[in-house]
Amino acid sequence: MSVWVVAEHRNGAMREVTYELLSHGAALGLGPVTALVFSGPGDGSALAASLDGKAPRTLIVEDSSLLGFNGTAQAAALATLISQSTEPPKVILGAHSAAGMDWAPTLAGKLACPAVTDVVALAAEGASLAATRVVYGGKLNSKVKLGEGPSVIATIRPGSLEEEPSLTPMTTTIETANADIPAELGKRFVAWVEELAGAVDISQADILVSVGRGIQDKENIDVAEALAEALGATLSCSRPVVDINWLPKER
């Protein structure tokens, strides 16, 4: 058995969620982890270098259709790699992102295999996976056990799983592969459109002090801000607080 992790990168830089995925892929104990780097021609080596020591094996696939985000191309490349493999990966992990939400269900359809998305906790149960998803706006946790197919797919919510450092240094073997990607994909990458950066990024905070309608009055937010400062935390809020313009949406 083995675990494959689809490395996610943007504008030439590896995203932090990739390291989370590699760490937890290894923690599943379902075999060695392979990082898959899909990129445009000539970009794969630099991206793979940022994964050195993080996984025992990194596989690079370069194609002009992979120059920008294209889930159809990624799914086609993955399907080809799996068909070429003498032993298909037991688990394929990706980020629950715009990219992951595109290639993961497409690949699941191609392979006719189980898939689960937006996972916040993941564990091996026998020969398959048990995944935890947050449902009903965060009110409930749903535990999902995937069927024991040849392969299963899971996309992980970025930041939900803390990165676990490797106990021993790894030597990474970097390989290249060719994939059969159709010339006509039905869509094409146009450009990245970056959201305007806010003053804070609460998804990166270790500690949050969060306020809701129970704060009762806008002036009382000062109390929460003082508490957050004392704790070395970041102030956040629920949606109604944003709706009445007491705090900005980024909070």
Image (spheres, rainbow, N blue to C red):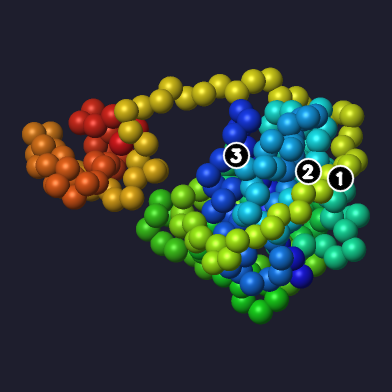
Identify the residue shown where x is 22% and y is 46%: 232
Say the numbered circle drawn on residue 110: none
- Tell whether label 2 touches label 1 (CB within 8 Å): yes
Residue 152 lies, in percent from the top left, at 71, 62
Res. 187 image quadrant? top right
Q: Residues within 10 Å of mark 2 (few under 14, many from 20)?
A: many
Image quadrant occupied by the C terminus: top left
Tell me which numbered mark, 3 or 1, is placed earlier along the sequence: 3
Residue 177 lies, in percent from the top left, at 86, 45
Residue 199 lies, in percent from the top left, at 32, 28
Secondary structure beneath dot 1 equals: strand
Q: Is 56 or 223 nearer to us in this picture? A: 56
Q: Is 137 or 164 nearer to us in this picture? A: 164
Q: Which residue is mark 2?
A: 60
- Tell whether label 3 touches label 2 (CB within 8 Å): no
Identify the residue shown where x is 35% and y is 41%: 202
Q: Which residue is mark 1?
A: 177
Tell me which numbered mark, 1 or 2, is placed earlier along the sequence: 2
- Tell whether label 1 touches label 3 (CB within 8 Å): no
Secondary structure beneath dot 2 equals: strand
Tell me which numbered mark, 2 or 3, is placed earlier along the sequence: 3
Residue 104 lies, in percent from the top left, at 69, 48
Real-space CA distance between mark 2 and mark 3, rounded to the nearest whole angstrom: 14 Å
Look at label 2 and name its amino acid.
Ile
Q: Which residue is mark 3?
A: 14
Task: Examine the rendering and report whether any part of residue 174 can be seen.
Answer: yes
Q: Is residue 185 above or below residue 86?
A: above
Give left or right: position of 39 versus 23: right
Secondary structure beneath dot 3 equals: strand
Identify the residue shown where x is 68% and y is 71%: 30
Real-space CA distance between mark 3 and mark 1, rounded to the nearest whole angstrom: 20 Å
Q: Residues within 10 Å of mark 1 (few under 14, many from 20)?
A: few
